[in-house]
Image (cartoon, helix red, strand yellow):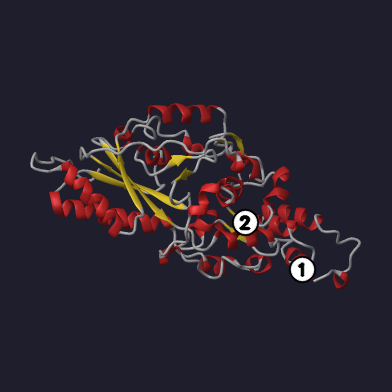
Amino acid sequence: MTKTANPGSNTDMTALKSDIVKWCSELGFQKAGITNIDLGEAEDRLAEWIRANFHGSMDYMERHGDKRSRPDELVPGTVRVISVRMDYLPESQDQALRLLDDGSSAYISRYALGRDYHKVLRSRLRKLARRIEENIGEFGYRVFVDSAPVLEKALAEKAGIGWVGKHTNVIDRDAGSWFFLGELYTDLPLPVDEPEQSHCGTCSVCIDICPTKAIVAPYSLDARRCISYLTIENKGSIPVEFRKNIGNRIYGCDDCQLFCPWNKFAKPTGEQEFAPRHGLDTAQLTDLFSWDEETWLKKTEGSAIRRIGHERWLRNIAVALGNARTTPRVIAALYARRHDDSPMIVEHVQWAIEQHDTNNTTMESIDV
C-alpha cells in the first residue's frame, strides 16, 4: 500500500462510493463494486483445489501462504477492495465459432488479440486512485490486475460484479463473461455491495462442451486438462492424450464462454486497446509457423502472448498443424521445422507429421 490512510471524519464514504462508480465508468470500466475482505469460503475452496493437485505446475498458487485469500495480510491496512470489470470481446461470437470450424486458421483466445490487458487495466486503476486522492487527499491503496496472489473472481462475486459460473469464470447477467477484472485494495471504509448469487441453475453446457473435459464437476476445473493451461502455463510437452482435442487452438481456449447461454447478452467491446493486431484474429497456421523469433517478438510486442515465448508458440502451432487438413502447405510447413534446434519443437512436429498419411500420398496428389 503506497500510503497510510487517515480519512477524516468529514469524508462522506457513501458519496465517495457514488463518485468512484462514476469515475470508473468515465475511465472505461463497465462495472464497479466494493467488497469487504472476508474470503473464508473462497480460501477453503482454494485449499481443496490445491490438495487435488488441479493447479498442475502452477506452483505460484501455493506460494504466499494465506495472503491470496486474506487481502490484509498481502497489503496491511486493507479493509475494502474495489473490483472493476472491463469488456474485451473484439468481435461477434459467430466469427469466433466459424474460426474454430476452420482447421487451417489459428484460434487465439479472444482476450489476447489486442493490447496486454494487464497494462490497460492497471493504467486505468491508477488513474482512479489519483482521482480519489485529488478529492479526499492521501489514502492507502494498491492496484492489482492478475499480477499477485489475489482471488479476483471471489472478490468480484462478493462485490456484485457477477457470479462464478460452473466453468469458474465470472458471469454478469446483462453482459455474459467476456471481461477482465481488476482490483484496487484500499484502507477506505467504503460501503460494500451485495454479493451476486449464482444463476447457472441446471445448465451444464460448459461442462459438456469442454474439449478436454477439464471441468470435472460444477465449479471445479482441473487445470492440467484445460487447453488454456496446456498452451500457456505448461512449459513442457503437451500430453499426447490431449493433442487431438486441442484442434486449432494455439493460445488458450474460449469454448466454455462461446457456448454459455448467458453470453447471448455479450456485445463486442468499443475499447480500441483490445482490437486485434497483426491479423491474429484470422491468421493461417502455416503463416504463423513460419515466423522466426525476431518476427514473433515484433508481432507480439505489447501483447499477453509474449509470456509463452517463441518456442512454446511453435509447439502449440505444430499440434494445430497436426490436426489440420492434409495439404502440401501444411506438410511443407511441418517438414521445414523437423530439424529445429529445440527438442520440444521437433517432438511436436514429428507427432504432427505422423497425423498425416504422407507415406501413401505424394505432395502433388494432396487436395489443396
Q: Quadrant of residue 312?
A: bottom right
Label drawn at residue 131: none
Question: Residue 197, percent across and down?
Answer: 42, 36
Secondary element type, mark 1: helix
Q: Amino acid at mark 1?
A: Ala
Q: Do the numbered discs 2 and 1 sit on residues whose CB atoms are within 8 Å?
A: no
In percent of the image, x 59 and y 43: which residue is there? Answer: 206
Nearest to the eye among marks 2 and 1: give it: 2
Place of residue 297 in the rendered image (x, y in percent of width and height, measured from the top left): 52, 65
**Where is the C terminus found, in terms of image quarters?**
bottom right
| Image position, residue 154 (x, y; %) | 41, 37
Can residue 253 be spotted in the picture?
Answer: no
Q: Residue 332, which numbered label?
A: 1
Q: Quadrant of residue 334?
A: bottom right
Furthest-right residue in this view: 360
Residue depicted at x 36% and y 33%: 67
The answer to whether 355 is drawn above or below residue 53 in the figure is below
Q: Kindly report the distance in space between the C-alpha atoms of the residues bearing marks 2 and 1.
A: 19 Å
Image spot of residue 212 (x, y percent): 66, 43
Image side of residue 99 versus residue 64, left or right: right
Q: Residues within 10 Å of mark 1 (few under 14, many from 20)?
A: few
Along the line of sight, which residue is nearer the eye, 136 or 346? 136
Question: Of the numbered discs in the image, which one, if any, rests on residue 250?
Answer: 2
Question: From the viewer's perspective, is 327 left or right of 83?
Answer: right
